[in-house]
Amino acid sequence: MKKTNNSKKVLLILMMSVMLLTGCTKSFKDEKTNKVYTENILCKPTDSKSLQAYEANENVNLKDLPECKKFKVTSGKYEGLWTNIFVKPLAWVIIKVGILVKNYGLSIIILGILLRLLVLPLTKQTLDMSENMKKANPELQRLEKKYGNPQDQETMLKKNQEMLMIYKKYNIKPFSGCLVSLIQLPLFFAFLEAIQRIPAILEEKILWFDLGTTPLAAISSGKYYYLVIVILISVATYFSFKNTSAPSVNEDQIKQTQMMTKMMCIFITIMSFSLNVGIGLYWFSTSAFAILQNYILKKLRK
């Protein structure tokens, strides 16, 4: 049980570290257009309306900023470890790939998929653990029936010891599946901040969608087809969570897992209304690719 408790502590520390290290964007509202802009941008905007809004803001000095196409990792002042190690390098890569494929939306999709491929070994490990958990499930269910919910310390210790023996037998590492999430979480926040701080991305389109517009703002102005973005994110999130959830031992755990999946899907669907299309595109493309990736891995395993 010490190992399990230590794993919980490490997981908690890592999650707190990610939250503390994550930077943030500053925004301001243009009174003429009622549009919200990112204040601490990394490079100059090119759109005439955007330029007017930034020039009217005293906190933004456009003279010190490079053109987005000429942006470098070393551009601008030092802004802390998070921005300089994660955000700026990622912003530079997004810009360079966007110039290469001639569309920043495609750049976001390509980089999202590449990052998924980088964590493929961890994804495979998580899938293997899930399959091993299915094999161990009958024994874990018998263990639950044998001990139920013990109240005394001696019985709880016996139950935990037998559970650890089953985990060892089937090579199950309960917290190894969290590694993929822990790696993707800072990358998601870095993508979020990088996209918001590069005006060139937010000024561009992919198909009929403005990358800098939120579905809520678009729908409010009568562009109801932006609901497609929200629906795609919701569907991809649901199947992504469903495919990666580990099998449960008893009915209570099954209900809890189903409830958590539903709650997370509802939360992300609501959140997707207020995220710009660029971020939504990243979330959908990585979730959709994860579903395809897991399907292929399961087929190869069989």
Image (spheres, rainbow, N blue to C red):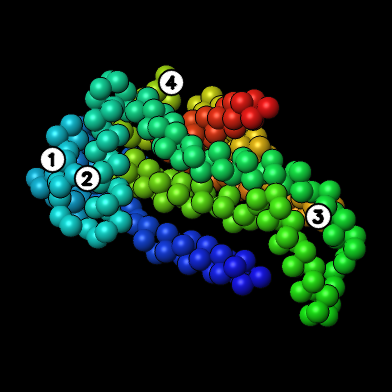
Q: Residue at x 76, y 48 (%)?
A: 136
Relative side of 103 to 62, left or right: right
Residue flagged by tag 1: what amino acid is it? Answer: Pro
Residues 282 and 153: in front is 153
Residue flagged by tag 3: what amino acid is it? Answer: Leu
Q: Residue at x 46, y 40 (%)?
A: 119
Relative side of 29 to 4, left or right: left
Q: Which residue is mark 3?
A: 140
In 3D space, how far apart are the residues under numbered discs 3 and 2 (Cα atoms)? 53 Å
Q: Which residue is mark 4?
A: 208
Residues at circles 1 and 2 in contact by the CB criterion of under 8 Å: no
**At numbered mark 1, what does the secondary structure look like: helix, strand or loop?**
loop
231 up-or-down from 101: above or below: below
In 3D space, how far apart are the residues under numbered discs 1 and 3 (Cα atoms)? 59 Å
Mark number, residue 66: 1
Q: Position of residue 101 (x, y in %)?
A: 29, 20
Q: Residue most toward the front? A: 169
Residues 268 and 152: in front is 152
Q: Residue at x 18, y 51 (%)?
A: 60
Q: Residue at x 56, y 43 (%)?
A: 125
Q: Earlier along the polypeptide chain: callout 3 or callout 2?
A: 2
Mark number, residue 42: 2
In 3D space, how far apart are the residues under numbered discs 1 and 2 (Cα atoms)? 8 Å
Q: Nearer the viewer, mark 3 or mark 2?
A: 3
Q: Nearer the viewer, mark 4 or mark 3?
A: 3
In 3D space, how far apart are the residues under numbered discs 4 and 3 (Cα atoms)? 51 Å
Q: Position of residue 195 (x, y in %)?
A: 34, 40
